[in-house]
Amino acid sequence: MKQVSQFVIITSPRSGSYYLTGLLDSASDIVCHGEIFKKNNVELKKSYSDKLNIQRSDIEKRNDAPLKFVRRLRNLTPKKIMGFKTFYRDVSRHKPVVNNVINSADWKKIFLVRNPIETYASLERARITNIWTLHANQKKRDNSAKPVLVTFNRERFENHMKTYQHNLSRNDKLRCAYPESCFALDYKELFDSQKLAQMLKFLGSETPVESLKSDYIKQHTKPLEESFVNYEELQSYLRQSDTGGLTT
């Protein structure tokens, strides 16, 4: 079997994962796919979709034999390092993948996390605008250029926090089980060349960090206090609730 170093980015929606996959895929010795176990999609680079004879909407072939699908993908990789991104909610539907990829010392794991208040706001905004990603060479749609304020809703935020904390707990368990094959990365560190260089070294890449680039750009640049209709209500909730010191 072809020897290809393998990694998986484990993250949550709105954490900058598309930007990270773009950075890694720009490395000279890395191929990084998107969310290949997405519920209704297979986010492969087009050349690999053609080679595997699988289209983005052709999820049955992937679901019937998920491990075989991953092995075929790895064996088609011309570079020495291959990876993809996933959310726990997606990969949990494929238990063989959980057992043989996530729970394996042979697969390196990058945990990408972001302040859950920021991801909550970003999710709410994306649901309003239906704009989920933005490329540098892509013109913004009319409604993406307008300031979009979101509303803090206690119930939705608490559900969001439960998922966030559960995922952190799963990350911690994997770090304890496979300390040498796990790497933690915060959203803010996506723009830290020193941290990115450490990540490349962790993956075994010889690509200079200054050559990394991504076509994805941040959609919303306003601070949190200018992002919420009821920002004071959010602050009040954080002061009165046990959120582990979480602040805006």
Image (spheres, rainbow, N blue to C red):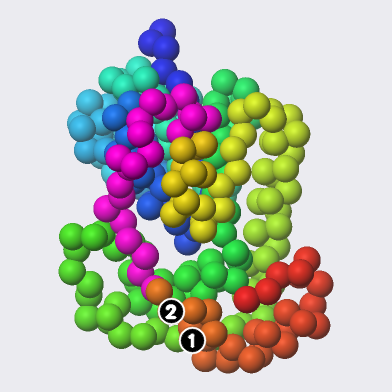
Q: Residue at x 66, y 90 (%)?
A: 233
> Tag on residue 222?
2
Cβ atoms under marks 1 and 2 closer than 8 Å: yes
Drawn side of residue 143 relative to residue 230, left or right: left
Helix, strand, or loop for circle 2? loop
- Location of residue 1 in the rendering, given as x and y in whole percent from the top left corner: 41, 8
Q: Amino acid at mark 1?
A: Glu
Name the foreground residue: 56 vs 224.
Answer: 224
> Tag on residue 39?
none
- The magenta segment is 200-220
Q: Amino acid at mark 2?
A: Lys
> Tag on residue 226?
1
Q: Is residue 140 above or below residue 34?
A: below
Q: Quadrant location of residue 180?
A: top right
Q: Residue at x 31, y 22 (%)?
A: 79
- Location of residue 212 in the rendering, given as x and y in whole percent from the top left corner: 33, 42
- Location of residue 241 in the rendering, given as x and y in whole percent from the top left corner: 79, 77
